[in-house]
Image: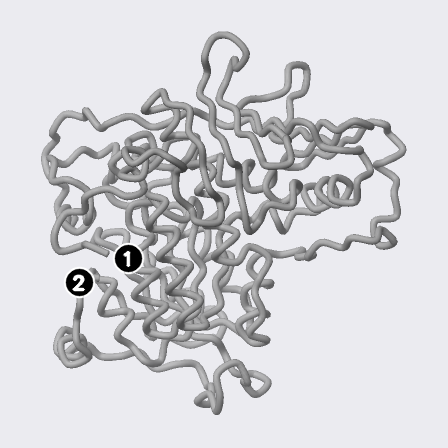
Amino acid sequence: MQMHLSRRRFLAASAGLTLPALLPSAVWSARGQNAPGERLRFGYIGVGKQGRHLLHSFLPHENVQVVAVNDVDTTRREYHRKLVEDFYSTRTGKPWKGCAAYRDFRELLARDDIDAVVIATPDHWHALPVIMAARRKKDIYCEKPLSLTIREAILMVQAVRENRVVFQTGSMQRSDSNFWKGCMLVRNGLIGEVKEVYANVGGPSKWCDLPEEPMEPGLDWDMWLGQAPLRPYNSILSPRGVHNHFPRWRDYREYSGGGMTDWGAHHFDIAQWGLGMDHSGPVEIIPPDGKEFKTLTYIYANGARLIHGGLPGYRYGVVFVGTKGKVCVDRGRFAAEPKELEKVDFGKLPIQLYRSQNHYVDFTRCIRTRQRPICDVEIGARSVTVCHLGNLAYWNKRRLRWDPVAQRFIGDDEANTWLDREKRDPWKI
């Protein structure tokens, strides 16, 4: 990476900052071997709507202590600092002022007392904080979709593996019993050979064409843009202050991949799980041609097809179609054909998939055991790569052949230039 900061510069940047006092907790004697009652110290990078949800998800955990928040927006940053301090003040019954607030995420990462970070920034701001956090030996929970480009996803996996940190991708459907049951039926062959999988997600993003608006006071707009091209401020990208909706930066190519990555990182992820492709992916990606392929279609080496769109007559997020039946799964819904498959004793099936009943508990448990959680970094990387491959086929109207082992396009030098994008200085990886 070109964005190198020495430890001396890190500490100089933090000079004058008062680090917060912790609730009583001994210093770790060894990584992952905490004594009972010790807390994992968390820092948050990005506290918009999803970051606030993740704060509320981890704050009640007795073994977690939030000690820092970061955001480029002053209002959001201070709001969530106060939210954390008010929570612990209520819990302890006395005033507590132990949460630091940072504009620059690098200052948060410089702290040796932070064990894990939760990253809930816009998609174009996932890769660099993840790589830097991994190099600082901090465990990581990062929101989906994992990356903005395929190369970023590959580099994130490398950084996590090289530094042996625990990583949970925020594709929390893997911790939902409906999706687990559906994939258990498929992986145990109870619907026969899988021929098609339908994933009902949105379409690709477009280049940003928003008009300029007056700059919001207290927002570091240049930092919000990061690697993305310089452009004027618009509140659709970074809504003013504390808001309660999901911003539409996800619609624009500079920052995200649209519905293909937003919901694709959920439903394509489940398709990958059911197909047993967590460490692989499709070998061909075919955009709509108005003939044989009515919509974007992925083809796997075993002949299975992953189809972008819902199966007609089935209002489900993911539908697996096999030679002996179907499995339909969505949030809060699960169905199978034939119906008796819904009453299978899942505990007695020969293939047992990883079971997590809470995505956040699974992460903290794995921090202590040093095991890989249910949605480890490579799983998140492989699933978002499926999303990116689909977008590249849509954007370029090209039939693409993909090598999931080498993670490169086959016989297509031009397509291999699409694995990454030019990044604005100094945010190069």
Q: Quadrant of residue 232?
A: top left
Question: Residue visible at 60% across and 63% down?
Answer: 362
Question: Residue visible at 44% across and 89% down?
Answer: 27
Front-most of residues 239 and 396? 396
Residue sticking out furthest to the front: 411
The residue that label 2 is drawn on is 3
On the picture, is 428 further left or further right than 131?
Answer: left
Q: Is residue 41 above or below residue 292?
A: below
SS class of the residue under badge 1?
A: helix
Q: Quadrant of residue 340?
A: top right
**Residue 66, how many percent across, how many down?**
41, 69
Front-most of residues 333 and 123? 123
**Residue 157, how many percent across, how many down?**
42, 59
The residue that label 1 is drawn on is 128
| Disc nearer the start of the sequence (2/1) | 2
On the picture, is 195 further left or further right than 103?
Answer: right
Question: Residue visible at 30% across and 60% down?
Answer: 129
Q: Is residue 89 visible?
A: no
Front-most of residues 144 and 293? 293
Asked if the residue under mark 1 is in contact with the one under mark 2, i.e. CB atoms within 8 Å, the reply is yes
